[in-house]
Structure formats: structure tokens, C-alpha cells
Amino acid sequence: MVRDQLVARGLRDPRVLAAMGRVPRHAFVPEAQRSLAYEDTPLPIGYGQTISQPFIVALMTLAVDPRPGDRVLEIGTGSGYQAAVLSGLVAEVYSVEIVEPLARRAEADLRRLGYANVRVRAGDGHLGWPEAAPFDAILVTCAPDQVPRPLVDQLKVGGRMIIPVGPAWGAQDLILLRRTPAGLERQSILPVRFVPMVKGTGKP
Ligand code: SAH
């Protein structure tokens, strides 16, 4: 998977490649999908949601330039796979998932597999995780139609956010934002299709 899907497409960062190589992707997909766990594709994980394609996970991880001391926020825990990849690269991972049973399952899987520096919360990711802010990096793995303001506010100056933005089920743009002392820098990375970021109850 690392060689054929990541290195072959030009991804070279040795730390990110090693982290991708260490995480057992099959442990994060349902039994029925296990034989496809290392294929070049997203897979269903129940509740109408998917675990992202390995290349997209690696690309988003690389884009935020994770560093060992970082505190990172993920929106859209899903299976917990992206959080597990981040776990090996940074100090602390906070992940928010709006579908409660998915949050509980990912939390249990991550604990069972020994990813002790990941915390999972069931709630609406539009609100971020204010008590743990500010973050060095934020990865959003579902697509809002615009960047939620609280997430920008919870990014450190010098921090990086990767987020797909666009219409639900339509053409979205994967965007890298950098918060600088002067404001936000925005870089378009790739056209993508993520599941929509659903509007929650407004309660954490
Ligand atoms: N990162 C995941 C893939 C997640 S798919 C992995 O590695 O497996 C996107 C996830 O975002 C879905 O689980 C979906 O339920 C969740 N989601 C959608 N809207 C959300 C919101 N407003 N807040 C938090 N999570 C949300």
C-alpha cells in the first residue's frame, strides 16, 4: 500500500510513510471489508460513512506538516484510522464525530489497539473542541460548504488546517489554510469528494 499507492504518487515524507505503514488499516474496517483493507479505495464503515482512501489520508496528514509536540484536532472520526495515523506523529489528537455509535466504536478500537494519546468525543465538529484549543493543526474529513469560523479561531498562529470545502455530494476543493500573524493564507490542493459535514444540533 505504501509503495504502490503513496510513494508511486510522489509522497515522500519518511515520517508520514512510516506512520502509514505502522497502522493496521484492516483493524479499522468492518469484517466484511477486511480483504479490501489495503486497496486503493475508500470503504464503507456503516451509518452511511466511509474510511478515506489511503492516499487521501496520507496527503492530508502531510499537508498539515505534523510535528512531534503538536496538539491536533480532527473533525470526523469515522473509523478512527486517520486519528491512529496522526497518533504516531504528534503529541495529542482530539477527534470529534457526530454519529455517536461511530464515535464510541472508534474510541473503543483506538483504546484496544493502544493509541493512548487520542481522545474522541461525540458532538458537532462545527464547534471544534474549545477546551483543548488552540491547535497546531486541524484536519477536517467531512465537507462543509464553508470553513466553520470556530475552527479558524481554534487554530494557533502558525497553525495549519486541511479541509474539503464545497456542496454536499458535489465538487469540493481540498484547501490548506495557514494562520499567520497577518491573517489566513489559502492554498487549493486537489478536487475531492467527501461526505458532507452535517449540521448538528448546535450542542457539543
Ligand atoms: N477520518 C475518518 C473518515 C471519516 S468520514 C476515518 O479515518 O475513518 C467523515 C466522518 O465525518 C463521518 O464519520 C461523519 O459521520 C462525520 N461527520 C459529518 N458531519 C460531522 C460533523 N458536523 N461533526 C463531526 N463529524 C461529522
Image (cartoon, rainbow, N blue to C red):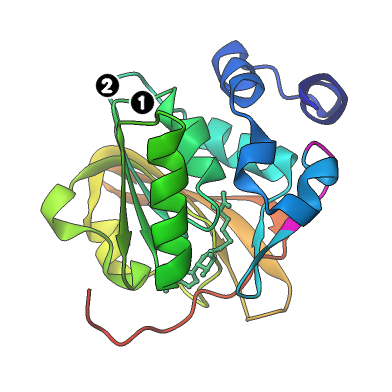
Is 188 or 64 nearer to us in this picture? Answer: 64
Q: Tell me the number on the disc at residue 90.
A: 1
Q: Does the beta carbon of the residue at mark 2 sit less than 8 Å from ligand 1?
A: no
Magenta stretch secondary structure, dominant: loop
Q: Residue furthest top?
A: 14
Secondary structure of the residue carrying numbered label 2: loop
40 displayed left or right of 57: right
Where residue 138 appears, as percent x and y from the top left, is 38, 47
156 displayed left or right of 19: left
Where residue 48 appears, as percent x and y from the top left, is 65, 75
Give the Cα separation between the discs numbered 2 and 1.
6 Å
Task: Residue 40: say if magenta.
Answer: yes
Where residue 186 appears, as percent x and y from the top left, is 48, 52
* On screen, residue 174 above or below 27: below
Q: Tell me the number on the disc at residue 139.
A: none
Q: Pointers 2 and 1 in contact (CB under 8 A)?
A: yes
Q: Residue at x 82, y 49 (%)?
A: 41
Q: Residue at x 40, y 28 (%)?
A: 114
Question: Neighbour class for label 2 at 10 Å: few (<14), some, many (≥20)?
Answer: few
Task: Residue 63: say if magenta.
Answer: no
156 displayed left or right of 54: left
| Mark 2 residue type | Gly
Is 30 or 17 nearer to us in this picture? Answer: 30
Q: Residue at x 83, y 31 (%)?
A: 5
Residue 106 seen in the figure: yes
Q: Residue furthest bottom?
A: 201
Q: Which residues are magenta?
A: 38-43
| Mark 1 residue type | Val
Label 2 or label 1, whichever comes before in sequence order: 2
Q: Tell me the number on the disc at residue 69.
A: 2
Residue 40 seen in the figure: no
Question: Neighbour class for label 1 at 10 Å: few (<14), some, many (≥20)?
Answer: some
